[in-house]
Image (cartoon, rainbow, N blue to C red):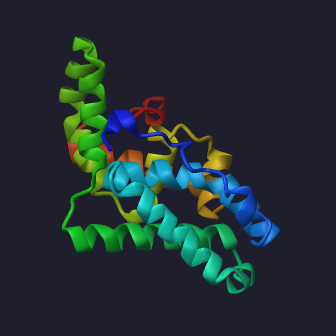
Amino acid sequence: MTDADFDPLGEQAVSMELAGVMPVDYVAFHSQNHRAYLEYAHLELGPDAAPSVVEDVFTFLLEVWPDALREANLQAFAWAQLREHVERHRAGQVLRVALVDTVKYAALRRGSRRQLELIESRSGVYEAIAELPDRHYDVVVLTYFMGLETAQVAQRMGISPGTVRSHLHTARRMLAKKIGINLTPGEEKDL
């Protein structure tokens, strides 16, 4: 599978036959989160590994579903499982974060000279993002690369919207320092 073939909606829904034997709340959780998990795994691992890693996450969640429901925060528990599966796959494959490559080459494929110049000028940003602490990294990826709103990021990660805003603020500061940009008030909203 190539980046061009990647379909974040592919295989999203639980089949009707399986939906009848799975817990209704699991089916709803799967439907609400599958696409975002797949997009995140795609950015992290690339298009070849993402579907199987996400399938493994949802299989694991189904196996532990009654226990998962007893967690204080189901979304946070499930997000932690996604991150763990992604990290385990990356460690087993000795992969670097795919974000750097997938973002750069998606722009290259679109063929716009202006986009290419922008990507080249910001390539240090992508490497710096890849080096952020886990939670800051996730918030930046979900917000800027996946286009989720603060409330959606908070829901997906199982954290409060205020924590999302705090992580974004801190991540912007860390990135600006790392790539040598002085942020003035008002510029803080942009990477």
With 191 as the anchor, is 156 left or right in this view? right
Classify 86 as above or below 162: below
With 65 as the anchor, is 102 left or right in this view? left
In the image, 118 versus 103, the foreground residue is: 103
- Residue, far front: 17
Q: In which quarter of the image is residue 94?
A: bottom left
Where is residue 176 drawn, in percent x and y? Answer: 30, 42
Classify 94 as above or below 62: above
In the image, 96 versus 164, the foreground residue is: 96
Q: Can residue 93 be seen in this view?
A: yes
With 91 as the anchor, is 57 left or right in this view? right
Q: In which quarter of the image is the C terminus?
A: top left
Where is residue 52 drawn, in percent x and y? Answer: 42, 62
Residue, x 19% and y 27% (percent of image)? 121
Residue, x 48% and y 29% (percent of image)? 186
Where is residue 73 drawn, in percent x and y? Answer: 69, 74
In the image, 24 versus 134, the foreground residue is: 24
Q: Can residue 169 be seen in this view?
A: no
Q: How many labels does the image show?
A: 0
Q: In which quarter of the image is the N terminus?
A: top left
Classify 172 as above or below 187: below
Q: Quadrant of residue 115?
A: top left
Residue, x 43% and y 30% (percent of image)? 187
